[in-house]
Image (cartoon, grey):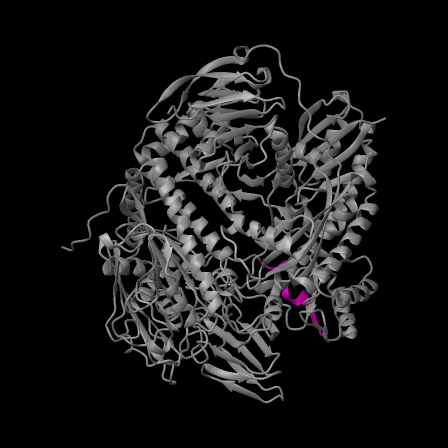
Amino acid sequence: MGNIRVGIDVGGTFTDFTVLDDETGDMRHFKVSSTPHDPSEAIETGIAGFAERGLQASDVIHFGHGTTVATNMVIERRGGKTGLLTTEGFRDVLEIGRQTRPDLFDMSVRKPDPLVVRPLRLEVAERLGPAGEIIVPLDEAGVEAAAERFKQEGVEAVAIGFLHSYRNPAHERRAGEIISKRLPGVFISLSSDVLPEFREYERISTTVMNAYLMPRMDGYLDRFMTRSRKAGIEAKPYTIHSNGGLMSTETARNYPVRTCLSGPAAGVVGASLVGKAASFPDIITYDVGGTSTDVALIANGKPAYSTDRDVAGYSIRCPMVDVNVIGAGGGSIAWLDDAGGLKVGPQSAAAVPGPAAYGKGGTDATISDANIVLQRLNPVALLDGAMPVDREAALKAVGAVAEKIGRSVEDTAWGIIRIAVANMARAIRAVSMDKGHDLTPFALMAFGGAGPLHSSLVAAETGLNTVIIPESPGTMCARGVLLSDVTRDFVSTQIKRVQGESWLDIRSALEGLEVQAREWLEAETIPDEKRALQHIAEARYAGQNHEIRVEGILSTPEDFAARFAEAHRVVYGYALNDHPVEIVNLRIQAIGHAGRPLQTVPGVAGTIKDAIVGEREVYIDPQTGWLTVPVYKRASMPQAERFSGPAIIEELTSTTYVLPGQSGVVDAYGNIILSFVKDRA
Amino acid sequence: MQQHVKPPREFDAIEMEVYSNRFMSITDEMGLSLVRSSFSTNIKERKDCSVGLFDGRGRLIVQASHIPVHLGSLQGGVAAVLENYKLEDIRPGDAFICNDPYLAGGSHTPDISILTPVFYDGRLCFFAANLGHHSDVGGGVPGSCDPSQTSIFAEGLRIPVLKIAREGVLDEQIVKLISTNSRDPLERILDLKVQIATNEIGQRKLVALADQFGIATVEKAIDDLIAYSESRLRKRISDLPDGIYRGEAFIDGDGVGYEPCRIEVAIKVEGDGITFDFTGTDPQARGAVNIPKTALDATCYYTIKALLDPALPPNEGMALPVTIVAEEGTLVRPKFPAAVGIRSTSCQRVVRAIFQAFADVLPREKVFASSADMNATMIFFGPHKTREGSFVYLETVGGGAGASLDHDGMSGIQVHITNTSNLPAEALEIEYPLMVRRYALATGSGGEGQTTGGMGIVREVVAMTDGVRANASCEGLRTPADGVFGGGQGEVARLKFANADGTVKEYDISITNILMNRGDSLFLQTPGGGGFGRAS
């Protein structure tokens, strides 16, 4: 009888594995090098390594992975040759978009070329009105002609997007039938399936990207299935989608666009569960990698969602965890502009040539170099001694910048970090503001290799009191995969007033969605006791054009209007009494609970003093200068014993910097909880 | 021996960058709140709004980049508050409102600014400011702006700088006066309240910043930021060869008749200073295409950023190396009470003239052919479909951008001083009794060349009920976008009105207040961009 759960996050450099033994609660993390030419190869290698860790692939009962396959395909433009069939008069909507240019002042910043070239954007006579009524019937001969044209051009996928199809999919479905008959083997994606919501550009753009991704995603998933079976895993594999839930391989094949934020979303879901277990339901996640930082908001245990996002400059709309990316990470380069302003990023030394101190050819001063100069990062070696550090090289790189601004090397290194922190803090404030939250009650949860190094500084800048460093912060995304549920959203655009008569329409639309959701849970073979349906309505005051998400059962119009008003007050700071409310989209999220609640971990014996493995001089700030600071080994830190900053905590893949004025403790889940000691008043 | 302006003061390279992020963080939050909480389609969907922070002396600290032409009005509004009110009459909790181009730094009447003084330790230290384009403030035509208007009094309600809130209490009477003068009063009330709330966010954040780091540190950082931008821009200007560079551009007509109006600019680069001299520009127009002072200033700052340094932080320091000369009574410095509603059309052509002048001095890879810089507008007005009363729906339509050395011009895009979004056809059809028949790129409308100009947009809108009225204006019906270095001109704009019975009338001048019955349609094709280099 199997008892192992496996979560995998496929990143650019490493593929992370988290393996949980369901019986003992024992959790392990390990990494293998990623194989970008075929990411499933690294997965197979990782599974092959189970044996040497005393694990049996055949014992795996749950198996999920997060992947950047789709995102990379878009960035590198490696998708399938795609055609678009749309309503007569609208083939250029895909190119015009919202008619705005990407940079207000710089005309050389261009919109990316559309994923379907103009000659492959074909029109057909048909037209629906806003109530789904047929104004012009579908010209079936025109669809046949378009299919012929697609055939001649050798397209691998066809996106079909007609106006107002979210209200009536009949024309799209019929066109899809005709095309699939003419073009067997070609992938077809209907906008009324992918995103049955109004706003034609966003719907068509999302559908086009979905079609574009389908052919290659299909191939990838085939290889992934073959390799994991070959490695001995029998369990049904799942893929994380952008809303942080798991979906079956079949769903991923049909809707690859929903995997665009797969990995980061898993990290946020993991963070929300770790936070909830540790009694921190309100969290800002702070995931710092080599070239970028991901920030997301979790309020009351629930990750914030967004529906609109750009992927490589292309607009997509689908429910996703609202992960915001900032172009600053450990490898970001500090530089001086010609007017004497000190800037950090967005250029990054990345893994190669890397920071100057890592000896892989880098000579520019990076954020990591600044941390090595200040000795917040180990100035001798990282990765438990496996990776030597050349502090002299860091001093030289930062020194070159220092000379230009006429400051000491320490001051300059401190300034580089301060600028990066101010930049990251700006993104954190925007994330909270966008969702209408006051930051004060939030805790900052830091993960990724360089998160814990800067998290206390970011907390101080944004006024957050608590910082949480979860266990093994370098593999949070893989851990999130392990904790996620199987989910899928079903949506229907119903622009209806929240009042007597139309409420019946809303109720009946909702019942229609419930039927779909139950059918899907059935198809995913989720056992009854693990099923749940979450009701979500996106609503607005009549006349507005932005919707707010309101969760919970739709009982009466009065109850809903009251809950909407409260949500509006949270997001915008006010509510309007007696102003009509309208629902725009109804959504049902079908949930199959697959994750396992988080367990406490056994503590380590010994005192906190025993965990001190050394001390070193660390530069604090220009007022304080250098201080001698204790260095703790994380694995040796006992639970529930308090320690004070300044301090450095080292572990295999991460380093935590604790500020003077902060104190910390390891909790029962193995998290480090840091807080600022209140002013002595 | 020429005496140049003294070099700007030294600044702290680290603090400057840190505070730049801190201030931008505040305008980010204000901008997000304004767009998301507002009611009108114009602000919420098209983002026709801007926010900024100023210091107590009225110096710009930072502006969130939404619409470049707004920059001047926010500055003009703050200046008007400081000119019209004694310091002791400006109280915590007050909020000021204005829109007037002649009395309060406005650039046309629909742009209503709200300016909120921010006090710290009992002293006026900052202003939080924002501006929204209100879809109608009364006047002769729906939307309040039309080229054929010949006086500011025909362009709706004029608001000098007034207190709309006194020590925290909103003056409902002023709100009522403004809403009463609009064709869509509900939108006015709701949006004005959101604008006031937006500044309150800015106010809270500024006070929190001063609490956290000390007001003296914050004020020093403002000086640093301004010094930095000034020094950076002076460096860019010094890199240009000294000299006088000339450009000219035409607008189709003066708003009333067919005689083209000429804009002339001489750009004088001298050391690290630059002068834009518009002497020689045609006298002020009869119609509403005149450019008020703050709109001309904003247009010049836009070109500086676009051509010399797109990432230059927009603050007071950006204005210091720049001198703008315009003769009173001309198109670019009209005398009261000239109409100014369609000023952005002429501003776009000012940009064209300046870009043209710079083509002689910039490296070839930084030169662009002329764009469809025309602010094409379609306004529909009629009975509401989903609620009581009437609607005003305004759409601006993008066009083709000019080609450059390495790239064809972008197609179907907003250029230069505006960057407003479209309204999705589906959203429009749900909301209004209209139907979009076509929204497409105009094939072949870009100018030929080594690289081709971008394509214009075709937009065709059908009335689904009787009694809809419409205006349509589009610059470039007669004057095309020029190519550069031998590149061809883009196609000119086209404007047509088709009756339900199939009769079509083509226009070469704006359409004002035309009656549309069910099945009638309005067709607009915006101009293509100019080509770059001779086509082989």
Residue lying furthest left in this view? Answer: B1
In this picture, which residue range is highlighted in magenta?
A113-125
How far across and how far down the image is residue A437, in percent? 51, 44
Residue lying furthest right in this view? Answer: A1
Q: Quadrant of residue A158?
A: bottom right
**Residue for point 66% across, 57% down:** A557
**Residue for point 34% across, 23% down:** A624
Asked if the stretch drawn in magenta spans residue A121, the answer is yes
Residue A590 visible in image: yes
Camera-side residue of A68 and B200:
B200
Q: Quadrant of residue B362?
A: bottom left
How far across and how far down the image is residue B412, in percent? 53, 67
Q: Quadrant of residue A1?
A: top right
Q: Is residue B316 left or right of residue A45?
A: left
Residue B239 visible in image: no
Q: Is residue A89 above or below residue A442?
A: below
Camera-side residue of B472 and A338:
B472
Q: How many marks?
A: 0
Camera-side residue of A338 and A616:
A616
How far across and how far down the image is residue B18, in percent? 38, 39
How far across and how far down the image is residue A21, in percent? 75, 24
Q: Is residue A78 above or below residue B180?
A: above
Asked if the stretch drawn in magenta spans residue B409, the answer is no
Q: Is residue A283 above or below residue A659?
A: below
Q: Is residue B433 left or right of residue B475?
A: right
Q: Is residue B356 left or right of residue A605?
A: left
Q: Quadrant of the C terminus of chain A?
A: top left
